[in-house]
Image (spheres, coloured by chain):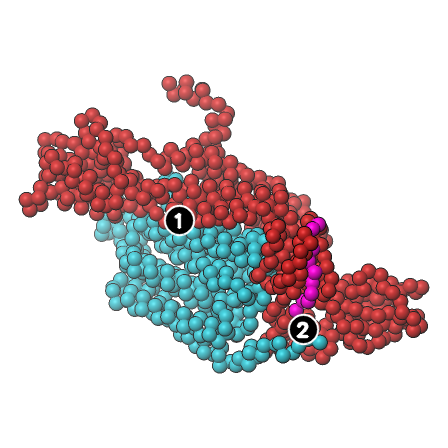
Amino acid sequence: MPDYSQYNTNAAALTDAHVAAYMAWYHVAIVCYLFGAAAFAAYWFFRNRPTAATGGLLAAAGVVCQATSLGVRWVYSGHVPWNDLYGSLSVVTLFAVSLFLIFGARFGAGMWFAGPIVLTVSFALLLYAQGWNKGLEPLVPSLQNNYWIYYHVPVVLAAYAAFLIAFATSILYLLKKGDEERLAAAGKSVGAAVATARPAWLDWLDLVPASGALEVITYRVIAIGEILLTVGIILGSLWAHDAWGSYWQNDPKELAALTCWIWYAAYLHLHTRPSFRGPRLAWMSIIGFGAVLFCYFGVNIWISGLHSYK
Amino acid sequence: MKSVAASKRTFVDDLLDVLSNVLFPVVVFLIWAVMTTIGTIVDQNQDVQHYYDMYPAAVANLILRLHLDAVLHSIPYFSLIVLLLVSMTVCTFRRVIPKRFPKDRAVPIEAFGLHGSAQSTAGDATISRTEQFLRKNRFALRSLEVDGSHWVFGDKDKWARYGVLVAHLGFAIIALGVFLGWLAGFKGELQIFDGATAAVPQQTDLAIHLDKFTAQFQPVETPNGTFYQASKFESDVGVIEAGATTKTDIIVNHPFLTKSGVYFYQASYGFGGRIDLTRNGKPVSLSGTGRLMPGDQIFLPGTSREIDYVTMLGPSDPSQVPLGVPLPRTDEYAMWVIHDNVPTTSRPLLVPVGKTIDVGDGYSLAARAPIAWTGLTYRRDPGEGFVGLGAAVLVAGFVMALFFVPIKLYVRVHRDVRGFIVDVAATTTKGNTIYEGEFKQLLAALERALEAGDGAPAESAVETAYA
């Protein structure tokens, strides 16, 4: 007969109050991102400092609330909060918004125009993640007794966050590039020619950095993301070596992550050719983020494998 | 001349040109990505029937006829990686090294995307001040006199130019490690019952004895009921290697490494069913180990009856109990009794441990307590050290190549009627835009450094063009 006393009843003893505690912070973060996205969208039209500052403050407040939510969940569960899809989505949006704020501080007003894209995607991801919140559960054995979980998961999620930022800057790049080409076609001029060259709702593009600068930012973010993804895959391989007896299992998640790695490696190789820099690489970045989404959601939700943590 | 030179080109030259062209690995990358995606989506190496069960017949036919069911272990898939390695090697020697390490030589400065000029009022001190300024800005310098002009060549973060080489080297070392593992490694899985010993087939002096397997589970409350989640698997074993026994316990995430380099991992577990069979009160011996595993069949001698063992349910392995179904108080075995190929009941029989049931034709079956077994994966991989080293080298190369921006400066100091002029051109490994802003600042600062020193600002002569 099994020894019933070995059963840890802490999980059963956890009440909804614990879940409500971390969800309260989570919901505040969602609201912050929603209003932050609205403030940054307003910045497209008003283009004044207070509007951007409001968006930045709301995004920062969202980051703090989300970090608190994750911390509370960590304390109550007794293990890392990114053990399931809900927790990992929360972490990836936390990283994405943090990275956006860091780049905003580094590159100035130009990056704030990416705010509506980054914060709307983050808002949507958090809203979606709620449906996967299963409360506080004990860790399965493969996630226990190891230190890789502290490094592998956050590093990979940080890579995803970097690719999300690159996705946003690539969209900005395409808009700006199109705008520059429209203006050039209109006679590289000002006044009436400019007015007829683009719709009024795109006037905010005046303040966006030149397409060349956006292309450099995208490249830099993807370079960081690719390094993080490489390190994340290697850390995952080391963990797989300890847990499953092989550093590579051809598990769907491993393969999908490899696909992302290959795709962005192709991007970085093409970037060495000046003739390929430009819209083609921006589209590669956008499609690459699609591959990241597939790796993240597609594999976790629809394809069963060793990484099907939901 | 051109046509003569062209005519001397051989097929090998053309082939090497193709292999060293950066578009070649990009195309291979994209094909690799597509094939890997197919391998992700389509289950690999399954029975034919599996694909017809999973997909509509037309899709299953397509998968099987295009061999998409075995993409990841196909020759084309491995060929892509070999092609990448070949391309990487050729590219390294034909393109990366020559282009990444441009020679110090007089160049047409105005032809560079990043170039500009600064007029000096420092007179004969122009050269020394220029060099001093560039050194302060972390440029390593070399000088040369060409056609009456003084040339200074500066490099910043030159070491980072090795990044691509280092990354390529890391990739090659990983490939070498994988090849070694494939060539000289082995792996497999042992299922060992409590108290039993199993030998590693590939290494006959290595065996493992299971003293005890422990499985622990935690109840998790959900709105739909309680389910039991595994919380710990532990195998207390004795590893017998060359006659010596080492006692240890193996848990998930903590493999045991033998002296001969074989890892043992906690991979799976289960419980073997145990029954006593009697006919008319006399014991009937069972063939095999006497421990039942799911799918096992027992043919009852002298009858057309058989027992099909399904599984064990109960507190020994509560994770097998479906969500919301109460956990049985004792372990019980689910099994079918088949007579003339027809089940005798509409649902599987549940036989609690300690109970005896009549299965017909004088046969009785008594359920005994189950016995645990552990599944231990073993693996020996002589290439894993190379894979680890290659991974570290690859990351180092990536950081060097992607994070840093090596700059090469070409500086020409010459004199015309206005005095000393300092022409500067810059190249990077990542295009001009990435260094555009810093280059402007560098030129402006250089011009300030070249002022006469009498307090009078020199007239601005910075002219920067950006391609």
Residue named by callout 1? B399
Display colour for chain B: red
Residue named by callout 2? B318
> Which amino acid type is marked by label 2?
Pro
Q: Chain of mark 2?
A: B
Q: Magenta segment, which residues?
A: B204-214
Display colour for chain A: cyan
Label 2 Cα crowd, 10 Å radius (few <14 / some 14-19 / many 20+): many
Residue located at (18% from left, 46% from top): B445
> Which amino acid type is marked by label 1?
Val
Question: Residue A246 at what x, y percent from top left?
Answer: 59, 53
Between residue B57 and residue B35, name the one nearer to us.
B35
Label 1 Cα crowd, 10 Å radius (few <14 / some 14-19 / many 20+): many
Picture quadrant of residue B303: bottom right
Question: Residue B394 at what x, y percent from top left?
Answer: 46, 46
**Is residue B205 one of those drawn in magenta?**
yes
Q: Is residue B204 above or below residue B27?
A: below
**Discs 2 and 1 share one subunit:** yes
Between residue B59 and residue A188, name the one nearer to us.
B59
Picture quadrant of residue A167: bottom left
